[in-house]
Amino acid sequence: MIIVDKYLLVVMIFLIVSIPIAFISPSTGEIREHPFIPLFYASIAGLSIIILYSSYKDRKERQKDNIKRRSKK
């Protein structure tokens, strides 16, 4: 399970909200003729970076815990 810091969670929420904004106009609620493709791909890239970083950080923390547990024996 991936646990995300609260700051990264806030950024992740903004990125998730920006995905539909790329395709739907917030002022009218209609689907855009020409969607903002860079916004869509930037949001997807940001989400994947956050997920990769949080899993990397979690793995490093688990490794430190395992080293501490092994050294106490």
Image: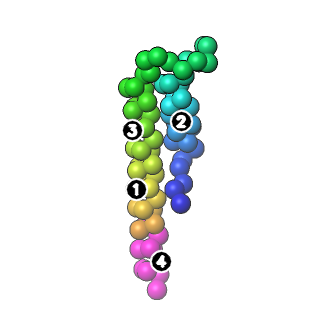
Q: Quadrant of residue 68?
A: bottom left
Numbered disc 4: secondary structure:
helix
Q: Which residue is mark 3?
A: 45
What is the basis of the colouring in this image? rainbow
Q: CA distance from mark 4 to mark 2?
A: 38 Å
Mark sitting on residue 72: none
Mark 3: amino acid: Ala
First of labels 3, 4 by sequence position? 3
Numbered disc 3: secondary structure:
helix
Give me the residue at 47% from left, 70% from top: 65
| Percent position of residue 31, x then y | 54, 20
Q: Which residue is mark 2?
A: 16
First of labels 4, 2 by sequence position? 2
| Percent position of residue 34, x then y | 43, 17
Q: CA distance from mark 3 to mark 4?
A: 36 Å
Is 62 included in the stretch rendered in magenta? no
Q: Nearer the observer, disc 4 or disc 1?
A: 1
Residue nearest the viewer, comparing 66 with 21? 21
Q: CA distance from mark 1 to mark 3?
A: 16 Å
Mark 1: amino acid: Tyr
Numbered disc 2: secondary structure:
helix
Number of labels in the image equals: 4
Q: Which residue is mark 4?
A: 69
Label 4 packing within 10 angstroms: few (<14), some (14-19), many (20+): few
Q: Which residue is mark 1?
A: 56
First of labels 4, 1 by sequence position? 1
Q: Quadrant of residue 56?
A: bottom left
Give me the residue at 43% from left, 30% from top: 40
Label 2 packing within 10 angstroms: few (<14), some (14-19), many (20+): some
